[in-house]
């Protein structure tokens, strides 16, 4: 058994029967075109126990008044975008490819859409992109993206969330990451902040390192929120260690410069909004809190969260809702307790905070199957009573449209839109939309477990099998842990309980003939889907249990509780009705004690009318306010009268550099309006400035009041008038000279260059030699500079006869010298070696006993051996077989020998033994054993 099995519905039989199926609504052509099966659910996803997750559900109001739903996780690898009309009619769908594998956040800036994504970096690669912000137009066409690489990140968005906001051209991101391994061997988690220039899509600042809270760093940070207040970032983090609190951080730096990270001299301001005590009953990560909302009011920073009783953090389990209001200078921190649920009862979820305006907020939280809400003032205090309705919250932040807060909840292919009226919190509207396939189902039978579902929109056929029998296990004694397939008890009293679970792993349905007799709850912390039936009232009850898609194999049980026909006494009012909520009354059976609760209708409001006269700026009206609950409405509106201003009073005189101001006061309400008085004219004094040799002349007009000036009537500079040149350095044949001319008007000087003088050359003719060319040398008699020309070629050597200086031999060269007849230069020549004169050295063959030699040769001049004679080893004797010298006879020995077959030398001798006589005697046959003997 596993947790896949679900009880899909409790169905009432007879006249009280209702359908549990969600209506497909008006899906029209949208369903035909978009029969896509979605996965996942966002029910109560804004809540968390230990750390949060990224927000995956978003709703925006389009420019045309329609809605756009953006959902991550519904389709693998895609971002789902659906458009709905203002009445939540489905219109169209887009699927946007994921940029990086992990979704972080979505943001609508009004002009563009932005999507934050990331990817894991387990190898700590500084070249891998780990965060990416992608910009789209309003038709989801990609414009540009920017990102962070490495960034001390192994897992982006780990154990936390991601949110974005913007101001002007600055997009601000607050999220978290698991960091590179630290010196202690662990990968720690902390927050991340990024600033992006939206027009250029460039990251202008970011912080992903390790610091402390004085620089906005929080570790661990389990949830992140970011807002702006003027030119300053205001952020909220859920910390469990450094610090262990809901910590509010206000950056004193001006983010509009493109930089937010604080300097040493301009650290952030921070305050622990709620401090979380140490938790010793389990892992220290647990803080007993879940933060749901953060926003900016006219006077405060508002923080909404749910926490256990922090004074008893190790034992308390029930969470209540708290709202903190922190003054904008972080000097005061007021905690408002919103709910007071008793310990041991259901907890309040992490709340959603909706900003109506700077002075009014809506707070919502979920508890069990209900949603509660209340309005808040700018200081976080409650404004009115708490209202409760059936429904759910999700991680979708509600949006505001036409005085209503709107959000959606989805579970696979079922989407529910919720719309809550700000002015009347009892006015909640829901619209259910079914996406995906609209099936017509052919159920299984007792013999065939096949279920066939055919989509009425697109024709898609889905087949699966379910059990062809039903086995239910019961436990009537709750003190016993054992279950039995036989329901051994069918008579019960009011207050009794029995447990059951279905053996087969399938979705199943339970039908009760009278649902008012019982309550059904799921038992937690069990591997099986165990349900508990508790009897509330007496009577007869039929229970039918079956696989949802095979009702033909239903098991039916007949149960009775107490009396079958109640006799009720008088009703007792258990809750008085008011003009805002219904009351209740209870009747008790006089025979069995069973009770039935009935609803008492709300009372009418008791309105008091107050006429409010119009003012200059506000309409007049009649206010009808209930004297009991404070609910009010307005009618009989009269228009505002408008201001009636008196004469203007100058409050600041204008000057020639700045405008002045004047104020008019309304004669009716004393409201003031300030008007601008134009600047006065400048008072210029004129000064004529004559031109010089190098500067233009002009007329200078300068204000005598503020010093502002301008120039006109320009005349060109006159230029210099130079006298005769004066030589300051005489030129030579190796360097230029200089001369100076002086302006006769302004004494400015200019230096001129005097060219070099010519060289004074003397000529020398140099004759050629055997090895060098001849030439004419021209040399300056002043500086020694020279050059050559008129070149004649070298004559070359003229050698006489050779003279031998070394005779050649058989093995070495000789030499000879020739001498030039003109310059006595010598050259040495080589004489080739003569080579050997060979004489043959005759060899001889080897014998059986002596060695021989091969032919060789030597030089007859120098006796050098040319061919070496090699020794031929003696061949050795070649033995013959035995040769008989004397044959043997009877009684006489013979002889034999072996000899060399080449040289006939006797090599071995031996005797031949004498021959013997042989006699054969044969015995007669009378003997039993014949024998033979040999005698020698």
Image: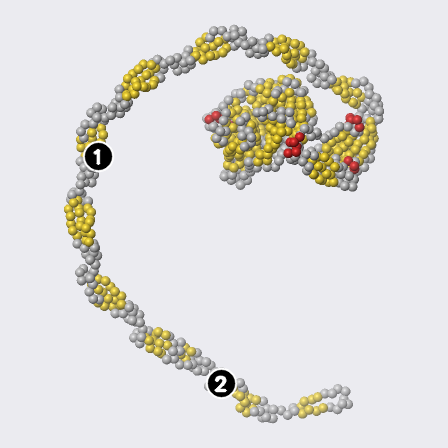
Please report whichever mark, 2 or 1, sits nearer to the chain's N-terminal start.
1
Q: Nearer the viewer, mark 2 or mark 1?
A: 1
Would residue 534 be seen by someone viewing this image from the given angle? no
Determine which residue is flagged by label 2: 901
Compared across the picture, whether 326 is left or right of 491 comes to left
The image shows a total of numbered marks equal to: 2
Taking 280 as reference, is 231 above or below it? above
Q: CA distance from mark 2 to mark 1?
A: 123 Å
Residue 753, label in figure: 1
Q: Residue at x 67, y 20 (%)?
A: 427
Q: Residue at x 73, y 30 (%)?
A: 20
Q: Position of residue 732 (x, y in %)?
A: 18, 39
Residue 27, label in figure: none
Compared across the picture, whether 611 is left or right of 133 comes to right
Q: Residue at x 51, y 33 (%)?
A: 144
Taking 924 as reference, is 574 above or below it? above
Q: Quadrant of the C terminus?
A: bottom right
Q: Position of residue 190 (x, y in %)?
A: 55, 32
Would residue 161 be seen by someone viewing this image from the given angle? yes
Q: Position of residue 62 (x, y in %)?
A: 58, 26
Compared across the picture, whether 375 is left or right of 869 comes to right
Q: Secondary structure at mark 2?
A: loop
Q: Position of residue 740 (x, y in %)?
A: 20, 30
């Amino acid at each position: 058994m596993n947790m896949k099995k679900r009880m899909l519905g409790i169905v009432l039989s007879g006249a009280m029967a209702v359908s549990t199926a969600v209506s497909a609504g008006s899906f029209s052509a949208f369903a035909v075109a978009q029969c896509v099966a979605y996965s996942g659910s966002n029910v109560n996803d804004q809540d968390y126990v230990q750390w949060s997750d990224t927000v995956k559900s978003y709703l925006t109001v389009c420019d045309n008044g329609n809605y756009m739903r953006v959902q991550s996780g519904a389709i693998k690898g895609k971002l789902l975008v659906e458009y709905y009309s203002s009445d939540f009619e489905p219109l169209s769908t887009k699927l946007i490819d994921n940029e990086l594998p992990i979704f972080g956040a979505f943001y609508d800036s009004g002009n563009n859409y932005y999507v934050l994504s990331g990817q894991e970096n387990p190898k700590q690669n500084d070249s891998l992109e780990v965060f990416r912000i992608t910009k789209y137009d309003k038709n989801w066409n990609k414009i540009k993206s920017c990102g962070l690489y490495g960034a001390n990140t192994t897992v982006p968005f780990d154990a936390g969330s991601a949110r974005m906001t913007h101001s002007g051209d600055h997009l601000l991101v607050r999220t978290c990451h698991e960091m590179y391994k630290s010196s202690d061997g662990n990968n720690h988690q902390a927050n991340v902040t990024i600033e992006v220039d939206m027009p250029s899509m460039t990251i202008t600042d970011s912080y992903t390192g390790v610091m402390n809270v004085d620089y906005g760093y929080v570790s661990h940070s389990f949830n992140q929120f970011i807002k702006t207040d003027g030119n300053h970032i205001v952020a909220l983090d859920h910390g469990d260690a450094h610090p262990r609190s809901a910590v509010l951080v206000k950056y004193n730096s001006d983010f509009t410069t493109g930089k937010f990270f604080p300097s040493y001299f301009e650290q952030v301001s921070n305050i622990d909004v709620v401090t979380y005590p140490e938790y010793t009953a389990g892992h220290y990560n647990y803080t007993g809190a879940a933060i749901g909302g953060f926003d900016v009011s006219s006077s405060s920073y508002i923080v909404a969260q749910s926490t256990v009783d922090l004074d008893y953090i190790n034992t308390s389990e029930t969470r209540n809702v708290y709202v903190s209001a922190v003054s904008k200078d972080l000097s005061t921190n007021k905690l408002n307790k919103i709910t007071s649920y008793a310990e041991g009862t259901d907890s309040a979820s992490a709340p959603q905070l909706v900003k109506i305006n700077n002075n009014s907020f809506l707070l919502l939280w979920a508890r069990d199957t209900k949603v509660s809400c209340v309005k808040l003032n700018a200081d976080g205090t409650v404004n009115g009573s708490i209202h409760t309705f059936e429904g759910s919250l999700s991680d979708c932040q509600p949006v505001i449209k036409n005085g209503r807060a709107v959000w959606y909840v989805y579970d696979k292919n079922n989407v529910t839109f919720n719309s809550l009226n700000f002015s009347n919190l009892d006015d909640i509207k829901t619209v259910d939309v079914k996406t995906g396939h609209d099936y017509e189902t052919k159920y299984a039978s007792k013999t065939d477990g096949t279920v066939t579902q055919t989509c009425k929109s697109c024709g898609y056929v889905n087949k699966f099998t379910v059990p062809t029998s039903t086995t239910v296990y019961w436990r009537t004694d709750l003190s016993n842990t054992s279950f039995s397939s036989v329901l051994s008890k069918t008579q019960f009293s009011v207050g009794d309980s029995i447990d059951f679970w279905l053996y087969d792993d399938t979705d199943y349905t339970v039908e009760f003939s009278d649902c008012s007799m019982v309550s059904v709850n799921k038992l937690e912390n069990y591997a099986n889907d165990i349900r508990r039936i508790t009897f509330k009232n007496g009577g007869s009850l039929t229970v039918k249990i079956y696989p949802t898609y095979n009702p033909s194999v239903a098991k039916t049980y007949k149960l009775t509780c107490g009396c079958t026909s109640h006799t009720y006494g008088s009703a007792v009012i258990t809750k008085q009705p008011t003009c805002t909520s219904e009351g209740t009354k209870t009747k008790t059976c006089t025979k069995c004690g069973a009770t039935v609760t009935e609803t008492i209708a709300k009372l009418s409001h008791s309105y008091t009318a107050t006429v409010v006269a119009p003012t200059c700026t506000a309409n007049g009206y009649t206010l009808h306010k209930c004297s009991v609950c404070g609910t009010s409405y307005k009618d009989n509106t009269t228009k505002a009268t408008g201001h009636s201003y008196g004469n203007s009073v100058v409050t600041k005189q204008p000057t020639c550099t700045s405008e002045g101001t004047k104020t008019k006061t309304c004669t009716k309400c004393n409201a003031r309006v300030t008007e601008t008085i134009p600047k006065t004219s400048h008072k210029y004094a004129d000064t004529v400035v004559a031109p010089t040799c190098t500067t233009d002349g002009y007329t200078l007009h300068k204000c005598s009041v503020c010093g502002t000036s301008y120039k006109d009537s320009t005349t060109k500079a006159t230029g210099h008038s130079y006298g005769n040149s004066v030589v300051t350095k005489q030129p030579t044949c190796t360097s230029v000279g200089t001369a100076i001319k002086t302006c006769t008007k302004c004494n400015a000087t200019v230096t001129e260059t005097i060219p070099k003088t010519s060289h004074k050359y003397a000529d020398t003719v140099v004759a050629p030699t055997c090895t060098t060319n001849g030439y004419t040398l021209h040399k300056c008699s002043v500086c020694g500079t020279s050059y050559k020309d008129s070149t004649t070629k070298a004559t070359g050597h003229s050698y006489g006869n050779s003279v031998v200086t070394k005779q050649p031999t058989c093995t070495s060269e000789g030499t000879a010298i020739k001498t030039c007849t003109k310059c006595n230069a010598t050259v040495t020549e080589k004489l080739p070696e003569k080579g050997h004169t060979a004489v043959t050295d005759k060899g001889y063959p080897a014998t059986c006993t002596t060695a021989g030699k091969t032919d060789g040769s030597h030089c007859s001049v120098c006796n050098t051996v040319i061919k070496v004679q090699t020794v031929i080893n003696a061949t050795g004797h070649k033995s013959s077989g035995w040769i008989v010298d004397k044959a043997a006879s009877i009684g006489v020995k013979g002889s034999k020998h072996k000899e060399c077959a080449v040289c006939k030398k006797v090599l071995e001798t031996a005797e031949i033994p004498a021959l013997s006589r042989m006699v054969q005697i044969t015995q007669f046959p009378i003997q039993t054993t014949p024998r033979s003997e040999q005698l020698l």
